[in-house]
Image (cartoon, rainbow, N blue to C red):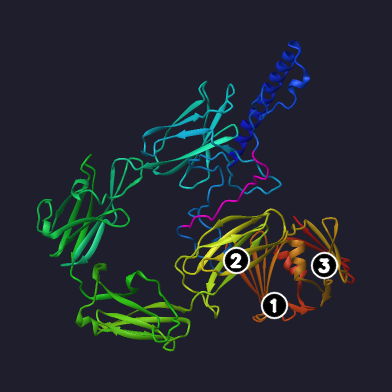
Amino acid sequence: MKDYLHVFSSLFYRKVIQTVCITIAALGIFYISCIIFCTPAEALAGAGPGATGAGFYLPTYFSAPGAAVEQAGQPEKPVGATAVTAGTDKKAAFSINSTIKTVPTAPTTGLTTSNVPAVVAGTATTETAVTAPAVGLLNLKAPARVTAGEKFALSLQTKDGFPLLPGEDAAFFESCDGEEPQLVGICTLDATGTARLQLQKTKAGFYSYSVLAGPFQDGIAVTVLPGKPAALFTAQKRLFLEAGSRAAAEFSVEDAYGNKVAADRQAEFGKQLAVLISGPDDKKETPPSVENFSIAANPAGNFVIKFTADIIGDYIVKATLPEGGVSAHSIVCARELGAVTDVDLAVQDGKEPFLRLSKDPAQPGRLELGVVLRGENNITKTSSPAEERNIIFSTDRPDLLRIEKTAGSSALLTEKGKGGLANVTVSYIGSGKGLQKSMPIYIAGDPVKIKAETIIDDLIAWVELTLADQEGRPTWEKAKGYRLDTPAGLKVAAQNYFDRGKAEFVLNAEKYGCYNVGITAEGGLSHNLQLVFLKKPKPAQQAVLFIGQESYIKDGQPAKVSPAPETCFGRVFVPVEFLYDAFGVEVSIFPRLKKITLQSPDGTEIIIDGTALQLTTTNTQKGSTVITPIGTLFLQEKTGTYFVPAGIIARILGLEVDYLPKRNQIEHVTFIRR
C-alpha cells in the first residue's frame, strides 16, 4: 500500500507539473498569435469545449468530487486458528497466527472498461482521503495461465485520448492469492504509449496485476499453474494393518519449485504414476494384479494406491514418475491383530461431537458414535460379533442423553430436550482387563445471541465471540460469517469466521477513547460491543507519598491517590489503585475469593490470597516461585477497595523505599526505581 501511494503521488504530481508547463507554453504561444494577427478580443469570448471555432484540450487529472476512499471488505477465513483460553494467556493466544489474512487494501484490480474513477480500497478517513485513479484509457494484457518458472510479459497499451508526455512512467503492482499488493516494476512508455514488463513466477497461485500511469489504472489476473512433476513423497513411510484387510498407500507429487501437483482425475492414473508392489513371498518387485489393485485420487489431490494385504508380512509399495525416474516407497506391514490394547471412540460420518436440541419432541436430535479396537503393532479394526459383547456404553448425564447400542459396535445418542455437557464412555472388557475411552458431547439449542469477551492492551483489543443459545450455552456452529461495523479511528487488524461456535478478531484504535462496534452474524444475530481504550500510566521513576493525603508527587509532577494512604501497626498501607497509577502494575481483584493478583511490566506476578493467608511471588523470566505466609491484616478491605503494605510490594517489584522521618511517626515515603 505504501509503495502504491508513493508511486501514485510521484507520478501524479510529476504529471501535473508537466501539464502545467505545457499549458503555460501553449497559452503563451496562443497569446502571441492573437497579438500578431490582431485577433479581436471579442472573437475569443465564450471559447470552450462547447463553443464553435477555437477549442482547447486540457487533460483532467482529478476525479469527480466526493470520491472517498472506501474500506476493504471482510477478511478471509484462517486456517488453523489458535484456540483462546481464559486469563492472561488468552492475550498471547489472541495473537492469531500468520494463516489468517486480510483482504489487500490497494490497488483495485481486474479488467475495467468504465471511465468512472476507480475506488481504491484502504483505511484513510475522509480527512485524509486520496483521490482514486481513473480508468478507461489503459489496456493491460497478459496470458491467462502460465506454468511455474515460465517467463511471461505484462503488456500495456494506452488508448486514444491518453495525455502522453515525454518520459511518462507506468508502475506495475502484484498481489498473490489476496496478499498486500507490492510494486514489481516501473517502465517508461515509448513514443506509441506502450510498455512491457517481463516476469517469472515459481510459486503457483492466483496473481492479480494492476498498472498505474498518470491518474489512470487497469488490472488483469494471471493464474500460475504448477510445473511438471519433479518430486514424489509418501504420506506414511510405514503403515500397519491386519492381514487380509485393504491397504491404502498415499503419495503426493510436487514440481521442481515445491508446488503441489494434484492427481489428474480425468487422465489415466497408470500414465501419471507407475506402481510396483512386492509382497512377503516375492523376491522382486512386480506389477500388481488388476483384481487386487486400484489407484485413485483423494480430495487432497494425492494418489492413493489400494490393494489387499492377504498374508502376514511386509509389502513394499513403490511409486515412480513416468518422466525422470523419481520414485518413493511405502512399507505396508500386515500383522495379526493380537490382543486388544486400546479402544477409540469417534463420531460417525465425520460429524462434530455436538447435539442440537430439536424443536419437535417427536423428532429429537440424534448422533451416532462408533468404536474402533486397537491391537498390537498399532493395528486398528472394527469389532467382530464376539467382541461386540465386550463393549459397553455409558454416560455421566443420563438426564441429558439416552444411549442405544446398535449393530456393529455403534451407539445411537438421543437428546432429552435439555442442554448441557455430557461425557459418553465406552468400555471394553476382555482378556482379563478393561479399557475405556470417553468423549464430551455438547448439547445446545439454536444460536440466538452473541457473547463477547474482550482483552484490551493499550490501543489493541482482542475480542472472542461465542454463539450461544437461549440459556447462554455455547453452540457448535461449524462455520458462520459475520460483519463488523467499526467507527472512524478503529481498524480491523485480523478477523476469522465462526468455527465450532467461536470466532476472534483484533482491532487497532488510532487514539484513546470509547468506541462502539456492531457485530452482525449470518442469520440476523447481532451484538453491540463497547470498547474503552485507556492510556496506561507510565511507571514512575520516583514517587513521594504523603500519609493521610490524597495527593502525591510522581516524577516531580502532582498526582492523586484515593483513598489516602494510612499507617497500620507501623506499616504504610496504600489502595491497590495506587500500584497501578504509580508503578504500572495491572491489578485483578477477586472479591468473592478475597484474592488480588498484581502483574508488573517486567513479568513479576504477585498473588495475595486473603483466605489462604499466603503471598505468592513468581518471576516469569527466571521461572521461580516463592510462597510466604502473611497475616490477616496484610490485605485490608476499606471504603470499597483493598489496601496492601506499600513497602513490601514495592521491594518485591525492585524499588527502593525510604521513610521520613526516620524515628518518629512516618510522614511521607519515597519510592525510587533504579
Marks 2 and 3, Cα distance to the nearest angstrom? 27 Å
Where is mark 2, residue-wise? Answer: 88
Q: Over which residues does the magenta segment extend? A: 63-78
Q: Residue furthest bottom?
A: 399
Rendered residue at 18%/57% (across/down): 294
Using residue 420 as the reference point, say whether residue 631 is left or right of it.
right
Categorize mark 2 by other alpha carbons within 10 Å: few (<14), some (14-19), many (20+).
few
- Please tell me whether mark 2 or mark 1 is closer to you in this view: 2
Compared with 407, 573 (above or below) is above
Work out whether mark 2 precedes mark 1 in sequence or the reverse, and give the earlier one: 2
Work out whether mark 2 precedes mark 3 in sequence or the reverse, and give the earlier one: 2
Number of numbered markers: 3
At mark 2, the secondary structure is loop
Q: Which of the 4 image quarters holds residue 17?
A: top right
Residue 522 image point, x, y percent: 51, 66
Where is mark 3, residue-wise? Answer: 561
Marks 1 and 3, Cα distance to the nearest angstrom? 25 Å
